[in-house]
Amino acid sequence: MTTTTSGTAKVTLPADNQILITREFNAPARLVWQAYTTPDLIKRWWSGERGTVTSAEVDLRVGGKWRYVMVANGGFEVSFRGEYREITPAERLVNTEIFEGLPEPDEHASLITTTFTEKDGRTFIEMLCEYQDRTDRDAVITSGMEDGMQESLDALEKVAVTLA
């Protein structure tokens, strides 16, 4: 059985409008990528322990749209959507991200650049999240994002490991 890690993502703030998330996965990049971009697999990890993913739509092409919806444990719906801007399979994914629960959500779109680097069968992910300004970035930080993100990335690793 392949071991997994838990709660090991690191969050830093490289600029006033940025969050950088880094994490190592005990799986090769092709499997982490597969789990990260396949709708049925996204449903298994995206909500972490905070609810159930009811929809994961992925049109994985430049200009293609994505949308994830979950029913949180409190019974309310949470949804995010975006558009793919750049795709290099198992290496790099650039997309917008919009939280649909905000008033005028499109005005608060962020740009997420995720890189997948494999070394010795392990994958290192860097997710650079760029927001419109410091206010948007700080709203994300104070939302409890980090706890949910840790759970989601832990679950992503578990799913990727099962694909081996």
Image (tube, helix red, strand yellow):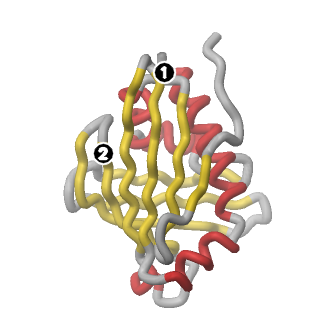
Among the two numbered marks 2 and 1 on one chain, the one whose residue lies closer to the N terminus: 2
Which residue is painted at 54% across and 34% down in the image? Answer: 24
Instruction: Looking at the picture, tell me which residue is in the foreground, 45 or 92.
Output: 92
Picture coordinates of residue 73 (x, y %)?
Answer: 77, 58
In this figure, which residue is indicated by the disc labeled 2?
92
Task: Give, as a three-letter code, the residue at label 2.
Answer: Arg
Instruction: State the quadrant of the N terminus.
Output: top right
Look at label 1 and name its amino acid. Answer: Leu
Label 2 sits on a secondary structure element that is strand
Quarter where residue 89 is shown = top left
How packed is label 1: few (under 14 Cα within 10 Å), some, or many (20 or more)? few
List the residue tagged with mark 1: 163
User: Label 2 to label 1, Cα distance in Å?
Assistant: 20 Å
Left or right of 161 on screen, residue 114: left
Kind of element beneath mark 1: loop
Q: Which mark is residue 88?
A: none
Q: Is residue 148 above or below residue 125?
A: below
